[in-house]
Image (cartoon, rainbow, N blue to C red):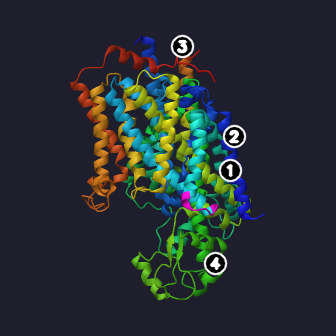
Amino acid sequence: MSDSSSDYWKANIRLVSILLVVWFVVSYLFGIILVDQLNSIRIGGVGLGFWFAQQGSIYTFLVLIFIYAKRMNALDRKFNVHED
Amino acid sequence: MELQTYIYLFVGGTFALYIGIAFWARAATTGDFYVAGKGIHPVANGMATAADWMSAASFISMAGLIAFKGYDASVYLMGWTGGYVLLAMLLAPYLRKFGKFTVPEFIGERYYSQTARIVAVICLIVASITYVIGQMKGVGVAFGRFLEVDFDTGVYVGMAIVFVYAVLGGMKGITYTQIAQYCVLIFAYTIPAIFISLNLTNNPVPQLGLGSELASNGGYLLDTLDKTLVDLGFAQYTDQKGTSLNMVLLTLSLMIGTAGLPHVIIRFFTVPKVRDARASAGWALVFIAILYTTAPAVGSMARLNLTNTIQSGPVGEPTANLLYAERPSWFKNWEKTGLLKFEDKNGDGRIQYYNDKNTDFAKKAEAFGWKGNEMTKVDRDIMVLANPEIANLPFWVIALVAAGGLAAALSTAAGLLLAISSSISHDLLKGVFMPDISEKNELLAGRIAMTGAIIVAGYLGLNPPGFAAQVVALAFGLAASSIFPALMMGIFYKKMNNTGAVMGMLAGLLSTLIYIFVYKGWFFVPGTATLPNNAENWILGIQPESFGAIGALINFVVAFIVCKVTAAPPEHIQHLVEDIRVPKGAASATAH
């Protein structure tokens, strides 16, 4: 693997790792493990932990995928491995 | 117009649309048939993926599941959406770059092994067949309730419709039909939800209604629901009932399983470019999230509506319970289907709906003169289907819900049938038995395999094996423990070799199968369970449904150990992996 493509791959892994940490935090940590603690904070009529479990985690997943797509497209160009 | 006329009009209209699309989007080549010529726009593919993914279970059953499980049902909401993050970042773009037709094809080439390919085909067929039975049943049930034809006729009509567009159009026909089906099902789901949210909370957005104050008493929806349920001896809606360990593992199993389900993965083979595959996963989740974030509102509001209808005043006051003679018409309709059952245990002509398994509350209930819970059956599935009737919505909304339920079931069935038939005609026939088959004959074989798959699915829908309800856990368990790890290691670990991958898949598959069979009966035959299915017997308290994630872990560990002690993969395979890691040079759209 050439240096440039191995740098591209490393940058890719770094990006995905960061995004997956957020993925883990909003669902497993906020939605399940820390749900009781977070429920003491309320937004409107919903405990924050409950909200993350049934609403917030899904919205975050969406944002994560679009950030991923945007950043990867930028990386493709930066390392000149984009299509066409 | 009569309700039945509306229903015939809506269901007939949508069916005519699907058949119209079938003739317009006929498949001319194997590329069309397997991957829609790789020419689908990412947003359109996102919509088709959403319909492909959201089955009769998502449309009909999920809100009911949430209504009765409350907070604990969050595992399904997170599990069935979080998988798209994994799919988008770990699989879809790379498999699109690989640029072939099926999931077993990638596994076979990446691990330079026909054995690996055949193991993958077996996992795919078992997972997909188990799933498709549920869809066929969903079609039968929807027809039975709304069109007043019997269950069998419903399944035959469903088979005929799928036959027309799936056999003629393959992936191309299925894709465009799924887009239409998505539109039907999402309107059918959200319109009643908006009306109900307006009724209860004055807020037209169900997602916000969930956290709003009730129009009736000014208290918050969820607080009121918690109190109402506790007053009747039920568990608090927002409280956790299961263990955190099982919730974490089940969520993880569902996420990994979602990312590993072949009928979802192949949808990402249909977009023109690698960058489209990335964006398309995001669009798929947008379209899925519209339904999945509405479902918690529908679930909680439906539970409150149902409880308040029966218990209209303070608990214990005799007149606060609904008179059976004055029950609303939707109550009568659903009693006819047997999904709602009432038994006047204390003979007072009124309905008492409470948790008689709660011993503390049962004592209080006795003092009220109650002799047990009189709602002897409240099927979860009626929550979504009865919603428009409970909220007194116009007839056309009820008709729309009928068409929506059918759209959800048919779109998922078609996607699964395509995954099954392409693995037979492309992986087994062309890949293993007849490598020299011409394209024209392969296309014909694909159509024959599709016909066969529809007949098998229809047969199993008409004669569902006793274990039909249990096999969904099996489908996710299989996808999580066998397919997902093999794909991920194939992309992210260049040195993974054929022996490691095959051993890993078999270890993940067998450990998951055995763990499920030990507690649920061998091959789900009743009475053959080795150990009783309860928390005391589970290893570390892990329930069988949650085991897929552990199976995946076993797969990874076994694969790494075996890989370390066997020969490294050949040079050209390592080059193949390097090649799929970069978008440049992806095969572009075929003729479209």
Question: Which quadrant of the figure contains the N terminus of chain B?
Answer: bottom right
* Mark 2 vs 1, N-terminal side: 2
* Crowd band around label 1 with a 10 angstrom C-alpha radius: few (<14), some (14–19), many (20+): some
Mark 3 vs mark 1, foreground winner is 1
**Which residue is disc 2 drawn over?**
B20
Residue B187's tag is: 1
Residue B582: x and y in percent read 48, 19
Residue with the mark numbered 4:
B327
> Is-magenta flag for residue B150?
yes
* Dot 3 amino acid type: Asn
Q: Nearer the viewer, residue B155 or B438?
A: B438
Residue type at mark 2 is Gly
Q: In the rendered structure, which segment of residues is drawn in magenta?
A: B146-152
Say which residue label 3 marks.
Answer: A80
Label 3 marks a residue whose chain is A
Residue extending farthest right: B1
* Residue B370 percent across, percent down from the top left: 49, 85
- Closer to the eye: label 4 or 2: 2
- What is the three-letter code of the residue carrying label 1? Phe
**Chain letter, disc 4 residue:** B
**Chain containing mark 2:** B
Q: CA distance from mark 3 to mark 1?
A: 43 Å
